[in-house]
Image: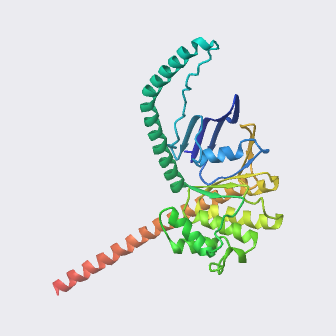
Amino acid sequence: MALLSLSGIERHYVTGDVVVRALDGVDLEIEEGEVVMLLGPSGSGKTTLLNVVSALDSPTSGTYHFNGELVPSTPPIRTLNRRHSTIANPSLQLFGWLAEFIANSTLLVFTLPIKVILRWKVSTALEDMTGFRRENIGYVFQFFNLLGDLTVLENVLLAQDIHGGRDKARAIEMLNLVGLEGKEGRFPSELSGGEQQRVAIARSLAKKPRLLLGDELTGNLDSETTARVMKVLVKACRKEKITAIIVTHDLALTKYATRVIHIDSGKLVGDEPGGRAALHATMDTAEAVAGAAVGAVEKAAKSVGGLIAGAVSNMLDTGSEDVEEA
């Protein structure tokens, strides 16, 4: 079963009389453990898709399942417009205004309860969406968003506090994982740009997300630092069994992905294996073989142990009988 499944997802924005189709019928499934690069020109719908996947935004239509369960979203809000009098004859305007007042008052009486119920539904849905993000989603942005008056470790611990549980050992483990061992007590101003981004990655990993989303996370880094950050990210996701979707304009980053998806004008226009697809498949196979081997060894050890225990038990029983006879 796919970790996330989107079917017929659309996200429309209305500006005046213009309808912008930011997402236009997106069908997508992503398996657990994949590292997906999402490529597309500016305005193609990349960030909108991330916002829907993370439940920061709700689709206009379509369904989104995460780990087999429907992801909460806000219901569409439709407004009823008040009537406005357009009677040109001054002598009849009074009757027009009176009719307009009666119509609008009637509309208010009938729609007010509906609006109250709808607002309650929206509020409840927003709370559910927040809970979904807290439990499942980690986000790494282009800008590091670290608090300058907190140390590296304190920045990570603060994120854990916000998400409901401080775990200092986990925080330190994630900082070590991204190569920042020994720098827990430094402040962001004492780190390079690449190191600050690695703090941001550790901060997201520390809450144990099922899905990590990155929005142009290497956009402010040079090519050498970008390579270091991406290697760290892929290694961390692999070790922690975290799925990742990363938005980028940089084609060079596709070598770090297991899958590359192209989006344009709100539609998915390409889906192909990334540079690490074969490597990950090989590693999955190796891990499966190793796991089977360990299982076989454990089973054999238990079997041999059982035989030895049985033999010892028989020896003890025989010895006990000999003593009784004596």
Q: Is residue 38 above or below residue 103?
A: below
Residue 285 x %, y %? 63, 57
Given residues 307 and 256, the one toward you in this image is 256
Give residue 36's position: percent from left, percent from top: 69, 51
Q: Is residue 127 left or right of residue 255?
A: left
> Above or below — where is 198 with respect to 31?
below
| Residue at 82% in and 65% down | 222
Q: Which quadrant would the C terminus be assigned to in this image? A: bottom left
Please state the total of marks drawn on the protein image. 0
Q: Indicate whether 121 appears above or below 295.
A: above
Q: Residue furthest left?
A: 325
Judge by depth and name the residue closer to the eye, 229 or 157: 157
Which quadrant: the N terminus? top right
The one of 165 and 289 positioned closer to us in this rendering: 165
Q: Is residue 324 left or right of residue 157?
A: left
Q: Residue at x 51, y 61 (%)?
A: 163
**At 63% from the left edge and 12% from the top edge, which residue is drawn?**
89
Residue lying furthest bottom in this view? 326
Q: Position of residue 44 (x, y in %)?
A: 75, 41
For the point 54% across and 34% down, the residue is 77
Q: Does residue 14 appear left or right of residue 135 in this picture? A: right
198 and 326: which is toward the camera = 198
Q: Position of residue 95 (x, y in %)?
A: 53, 14
User: Coloring scheme of the render?
Assistant: rainbow
